[in-house]
Amino acid sequence: MREVVAGLQGSRIREVANEGIGREGVLAFWFGESDEVTPEPIRAAAIASLQAGETFYAHNLGLPELREAIAGYTDRLHPGRGAGHWFGRIAVTSGGVNGLMLAAQTLVDAGDEVAVVTPAWPNLAAQPAILGARLRTIPLVPRAGAWALDLDALRAAVTPATRVLIVNAPANPTGFTLTASEQRAILDHCRATGTWIVADEVYERLYYGDDTPNGAAPSFLDVAEPDDRLVVAHSFSKSFLMTGWRLGWLVLPPGLTDAVGKLIEFNTSCAPVFVQRGAVAAIAHGDQVTPALVAHLRRCRDTLVPLLQAVPGLELATPRGGMYAFFRLPGQADCLDVAKRLVREAGLGLAPGSAFAPEAAGWLRWCFASRDTARLEEGVRRLQGWLDSA
């Protein structure tokens, strides 16, 4: 076994979840997914594909129908160039995580320096590390519960020696979002240093600001040129309630698409056809599915956050994107221990901040993508009761 693989840290989220699986009555908010099932038209399209016998290999880059649908969807969110501009830049992947790994395999050699903005979903740092990269982190700065990017710190960290910068916004776990001006500043700096940007924009549609014309979070695609060193990762998981379907896509510079197609052959060959048919239906019905989901998530956020903010000493800012409340409890530095105790003693399942970066030790992540807001209210009651008895 390679040393780097042997040394990979297991999921601390899963470690906490293992404390609760099988325990009766635990309210689980530890995983990053909604408890709502995939909408019926998406499921029906996949079933129809299977019944039609579509059980064979597909094109490495995805069904042409799906790539066309994604190109049109991309152009609606980032207008001005036409769907044809995007089609040759789309690679369908077997999940967002697979897309991010493909991006790393395309760009990173052993020994390369890769910078990651943290706290971040653990896979973003683990993937280049698996490939033998040298990691450099750029920590966000918490101020009154809100996490912000220090652009000067980023400029100092990203040098001509930095092969790739990885940034996730809207972010898991912090809810941090980038402004368009910050994206321009990052892009300008990376142009000067020759650094690739891998932008994880999986939560682009889960955005609660009112400062963009399409309701989506600001995207690097709005400020970049086609030949910029930019790879943007997307997923059907969050905005279309398709976490278990394992389907995503990359938006690539035109000269990179064929190379990624080769890598898909050596990783997964292709995404299953029936899953891709479901994705075509997801985009076709997206005007009904996604806005309703975002409106519901906003209600969940606006239910949970004020209740948590009312807990004495708790530090939390209202997230502008994503589906997580990321907060710090007073006098509780060991968040992994706290998360396990909350499962055992309060029947409340949260994710420990230390799963996302050392600088997030002492923080907890609460996924508020709940079908029933009453579950969120009960969760806060359990948290407050646990704090009162501690």
Image (cartoon, rainbow, N blue to C red):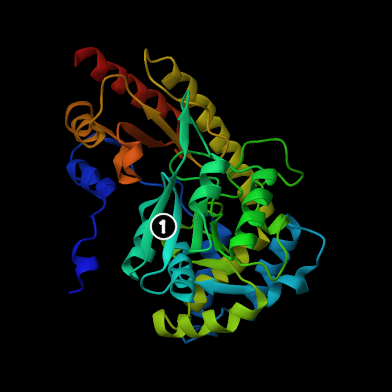
Residue furthest out toward the right: 80
At x 43%, y 46%, the residue is 118
The percent coordinates of residue 251 (x first, y second) are 61, 68
The reply to whether residue 371 is visible in this rendering is: no
Disc 1 residue crowd, few under 14, some 14–19, many 20+, Cα 10 Å: many
The percent coordinates of residue 80 (x first, y second) are 82, 61
At x 31%, y 17%, the residue is 384
Q: Quadrant of residue 191?
A: bottom right
Count of picture labels: 1
Quadrant into which the C terminus falls? top left
The amino acid type of the residue labelled 1 equals: Leu
Q: Is residue 50 above or below residue 27?
A: below
Q: Is residue 235 above or below residue 152?
A: below
- Judge by depth and name the residue closer to the eye, 278 or 238: 238
The percent coordinates of residue 325 (x first, y second) are 44, 33
- Judge by depth and name the residue closer to the eye, 261 or 44: 261
The reply to whether residue 43 is visible in this rendering is: yes
Residue under label 1, please give it: 124
Q: Is residue 135 left or right of residue 62?
A: left
Quadrant into which the N terminus falls? bottom left
Secondary structure beneath label 1 = helix
Q: Is residue 149 left or right of residue 313?
A: right
Q: Quadrant of residue 123?
A: bottom left
Q: Is residue 295 above or below residue 83?
A: above
